[in-house]
Image (tube, helix red, strand yellow):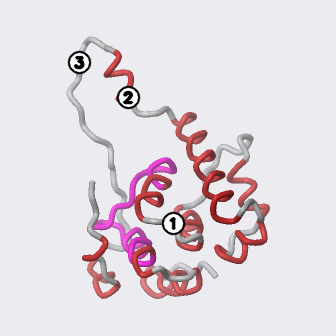
Amino acid sequence: MKIDLLKISKDNIMSIPYNSSTDNEQKSKVSTRINDKNIKDMPLSDDDMRIEFRKKLTQIFFDKTKGVYANLDAKTLIREDTFRKWQSDKIKKRPQRHMLAKFAVGLGLDFETTNELFTLHSNALDLKNNRLDYIIACAIKDRDDIEQFCNDVEEYCGLQLL
């Protein structure tokens, strides 16, 4: 789905529902035969999604911070020990969406990369039904720093991230 970031504005935040769960699963036709195309199009298992999520997270970390945890902390307000837990394959728990948002906004990721990261995490950003997701998109579009993003989340969602 192509999102037009030019149409996203902080003026519209209050029109987005605060709490909503979305089910972004695509419905597909059921076939009794499985061919190579079907196998290729199958979604990843939860374990595979966790692995791909950790790979993507680590790749972004090294690309944006040169592998320096102090840079990560300064840009995202995410501590080294917290990030190392996200990278660990021993811990099955994924970060909360608002923490992943701090990572994406703080490192200045573009919308496509952020959406891919959220898709690997749980589900894609839902700008029509989830206010936090809309605020994330606004912050990406406006190139907000981490403090501005955290202030917007607190103001519009009542969630303290600082």
- The answer to whether residue 127 is magenta is yes
Q: Quadrant of residue 91?
A: top right
Q: CA distance from mark 1 to mark 2?
A: 27 Å
Near-viewer residue (66 or 31) = 66
Q: Nearer the viewer, mark 1 or mark 2?
A: 1
Q: Secondary structure at mark 1?
A: loop
Q: Amino acid at mark 1?
A: Leu
The residue labelled by disc 3 is 31
Identify the residue position indicated by label 1 in the image: 109
Q: CA distance from mark 3 to mark 2?
A: 13 Å
Which badge, 3 or 2, is on the more N-terminal residue?
3
Query: The magenta stretch spans which residues?
Result: 118-139
Q: Which residue is disc 2 drawn over?
A: 42
Q: Give the crowd class for mark 2: few <14, some 14-19, many >=20 residues within 10 Å.
A: few
Q: Is residue 24 above or below residue 61?
A: above
Residue contact at pointers 1 and 2, CB within 8 angstroms: no
Q: Earlier in the sequence, mark 1 or mark 2?
A: 2
